[in-house]
Image (cartoon, rainbow, N blue to C red):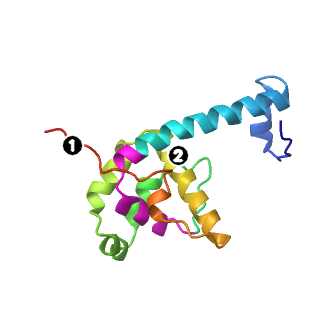
Amino acid sequence: MARIQIVLSEETAAAVQARGNSSEAGRVCLERYFALLERGLAEARNTLTVAEVSLLCDICNGKIFGPHTLLYLSVEAEDAEDGYFDKWSVDRAALVGKLQRMSAVAIAATVDAIERFWRAASTGMTVPFTTVLGADPEPPVRPA
């Protein structure tokens, strides 16, 4: 196993310690978190179009979501300037509605993917918007 060192807030450290041996509990908590993000990405891929993901990346450039603002992605979309919606040919109300209906896990996974996209882009990597969610998102399937 790889060893890394992280610094936690007192609150987070207490939460880890309440779950047992700090190293083991921290590892298990992170593994669970990443497993949940994978499930959330699957939901996001089935909900959002490439244009919508591209717009979200665009409006979240430089944005840092903390634990208390993580679920405000729909607010970011709702408050974005009209030019972003024109640029990506996305309907604001439709996107905001989708974001409001997505599970908290899917929103967290989308935010995490956007943050990883910008981190990769900041290192000079060219990352196509179509791969932000881990695979080309398909337009959502509409019932007949």
- Residue corresponding to mark 2: 109
Residue 75 lies, in percent from the top left, at 42, 57
- Residue corresponding to mark 1: 142
> Three-letter amino acid code at disc 1?
Arg
> Three-letter amino acid code at disc 2?
Ala
- Assign the C terminus to one quadrant of the image: top left
Look at the image and tell me whether residue 69 can be seen. Answer: no
Q: Is residue 93 above or below residue 81?
A: above
The answer to whether residue 49 is magenta is yes
The segment highlighted magenta reads: 45-61
The picture quadrant where one finds residue 79 is: bottom left
Give the camera-side residue of 114 and 42.
42
Residue 13 lies, in percent from the top left, at 80, 37
Residue 7 lies, in percent from the top left, at 83, 47
Q: Is residue 86 above or below residue 129?
A: below
Give the camera-side residue of 46 and 33.
46
